[in-house]
Image: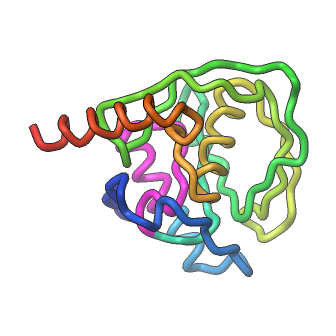
């Protein structure tokens, strides 16, 4: 297992949809292990493979109070989203030093391939739901700043670049 480096915001791999995972292999399990270790080192509550340069539809989420509860997902897709919304400050290691309040459905039902390679439907609520949706955005080539107005997005990207240079 290893902590992986994050791609910078302007890397094209972050802005393109990731490729579907055909099967859960030992390689996929090793990538998930690295992703969990990288997520825990941030520390964060979720990570998508494109954030570390792997253009596969893989994500991990752990919004538990104690670590070690990571859900490993391949090809996650939202089946149902609640009408009740939840606002949360979101950030990304691909755009360090900045964050924005993003409003997303408070609860989602997600279908994904689990560690055993089986299709699983799971309900996520609160921070878990926010993180899962954030990761699915990454897998679709979007970052949280894509939910903002163009002006606000430009301001945050410029601020992050300035902070990174300092």
* Quadrant in the picture for the C terminus: top left
**Residue occupying the far front of the picture:** 151
The quarter of the rendered structure image containing the N terminus is: bottom left
**Which secondary structure type mostly characterizes the magenta part of the structure?**
helix
Q: Give the image location of residue 64, x and y in percent.
A: 60, 30
Which residue is rendered at x = 60% and y = 32% of the image? 63
Is residue 79 on the magenta stretch?
no
Q: Residue at x 37, y 52 (%)?
A: 9
Tell me: 153 left or right of 165: right
**Position above or below: 87 against 54:** above
Residue 28: image quadrant is bottom right
Please identify the quarter of the rendering in which residue 160 is found.
top left
Quarter holding residue 12: bottom left
Work out whether residue 156 can be spotted. Answer: yes
Which of these two is toward me, 134 or 113? 134
What is the magenta range? 34-53
Q: Position of residue 134 (x, y in %)?
A: 61, 42
**Is residue 48 in the magenta section?**
yes
Side of 153 where 143 appears, left or right: right
Residue 3 visible in the current orientation: no
Q: Position of residue 89 (x, y in %)?
A: 51, 22
Number of numbered callouts drawn: 0
Q: Residue at x 60, y 56 (%)?
A: 59
Work out whether 8 lies above or below 23. Answer: above
Question: Vertically, is 109 above or below 99?
Answer: below
Q: Nearer the viewer, residue 126 or 38?
A: 126
Q: Residue at x 67, y 42 (%)?
A: 132
């Amino acid at each position: 297992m290893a902590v992986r480096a994050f791609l910078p915001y302007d890397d094209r791999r972050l802005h393109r949809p990731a490729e579907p995972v055909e099967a859960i292999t030992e390689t996929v399990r090793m990538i998930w292990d690295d992703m969990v270790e990288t997520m825990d080192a941030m520390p964060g509550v979720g990570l998508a493979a494109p954030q570390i340069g792997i253009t596969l539809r893989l994500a991990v989420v752990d919004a538990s109070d104690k670590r070690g509860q990571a859900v490993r997902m391949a090809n996650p897709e939202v089946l149902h989203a609640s009408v009740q919304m939840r606002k949360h400050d979101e950030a990304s290691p691909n755009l360090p030093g900045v964050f924005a309040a993003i409003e997303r459905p408070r609860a989602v039902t997600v279908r994904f391939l689990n560690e055993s390679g089986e299709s699983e439907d799971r309900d996520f609520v609160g921070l878990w739901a926010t993180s899962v949706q954030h990761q699915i955005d990454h897998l679709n080539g979007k970052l949280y700043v894509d939910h903002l107005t163009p002006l606000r997005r430009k301001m945050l990207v410029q601020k992050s670049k300035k902070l990174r240079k300092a």
